[in-house]
Image (spheres, rainbow, N blue to C red):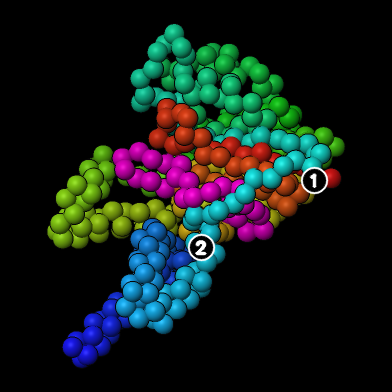
Amino acid sequence: MRKIGCLVRWVLFTLNILVAIGFLISAYSPYISPVSHPLWACAGLFFPFLFLANLLFIFVWVCIKWQYAFFPLLVLVAGWSSIWNYCPLGSEEKPEGGEVIKLLTYNTQDIALTKEYDKQEGNPVLNYLRDSDADIICLQEFNPSAKVKQKEIDRALACYPYHVRVKGEGPGRLACYSRYPILSAETIDYKTESNASILYRLKFGNDTLVLINNHLESNKLDAHDKTVYNDILKSPREKNIKNGGKHLFHKIAKVVAVRAPQADSVAQAIAVNRTRYMLVCGDFNDSPISYAHRVVGQGLNDVYRKAGRGPGFTYYENRFYFRIDHIFASDAFRILECKIDRSINASDHYPVWCLLEKTK
């Protein structure tokens, strides 16, 4: 019996080592170049599963031989920064007398183009934006159509005296609506098929606020890809996982290699235009454990990391659950609150808003 017990512990510890290696690769995958190693750079997609596996090993070792539990515990400590990025336990702050602004970012999926709604009640996206009381709104995939006319948009958002709408390389359009005067808007130059990043300068009292609205390269998962993914979930047989998983993983890796230079361009624009008051937001199409998130957020504060709680998924359609919409702020802002607003499901994304206090 003693030999059997030793064998079981040896097998379990070997598995624990493999899980630990996978977890650490996943946790530090944001430092892997997606251009040189696109597959390895996607390791962050497996982060929540490897994190849970390490937690399970802690429980197992406590039950079998408690001293061994220190190993998976130390592994989690080594990946603590990524754990906090993925699932923060932030706290809300109260204003200290400074000017408070509300920033909202929202990928509207062509202003609820695929959703049915009561025409008498009006478009749910436009109603939400009108009632949001946000001081600055950054929008992605904000395209007028036969279903939503430009006149309807202008009427609904007439409370915002300043706005700029810029069309991306493809059909995607980014927009900024503001209660602060927009002094300029310029497109950040990078290679893309249908996306864009826009740098705005806003008059912010006696200061200038630099704001960057992003819609980085989409993962381009078509109807077939989504069917493959749902087949894996419905019937997780070895063949489905092997073939379907390999197909999806390679497709995502291909796009990650495209998105990385875009993130580099945005990071360079941040460095060149850095000012005391700076905000960066939008649809990054990448999780908090990613190269794009790390590079763009250098020197800035991830607002959700500071004031959000839990994984905070912002994309939720077709059983894909990811936080791919992010807000970053410079140190000149105190982060008071950050919410992913699940009160509206008119798009495949939830809007994200935050309250920021201008420091004196």
Say which residue appears at 56% left-offset and 40% top-offset: 339
Name the residue tied to disc 1: 359
Judge left or right: residue 169 versus residue 249: right
The one nearer the camera, 190 or 339, is 339
* Quadrant of the image containing the C terminus: top right
Quarter assignment of residue 214: top right
- Residue interval drawn in magenta: 296-322
Judge left or right: residue 250 versus residue 137: left
Whether 57 is drawn above or below 164: the answer is below
Which amino acid is tagged 2?
Ser
Quarter assignment of residue 57: bottom left
Say which residue appears at 49% left-offset and 56% top-offset: 86
Residue 189 pos. (x, y %): 57, 47
Which label was assigned to residue 82?
2
Which amino acid is tagged 1?
Thr
- Magenta includes 145? no
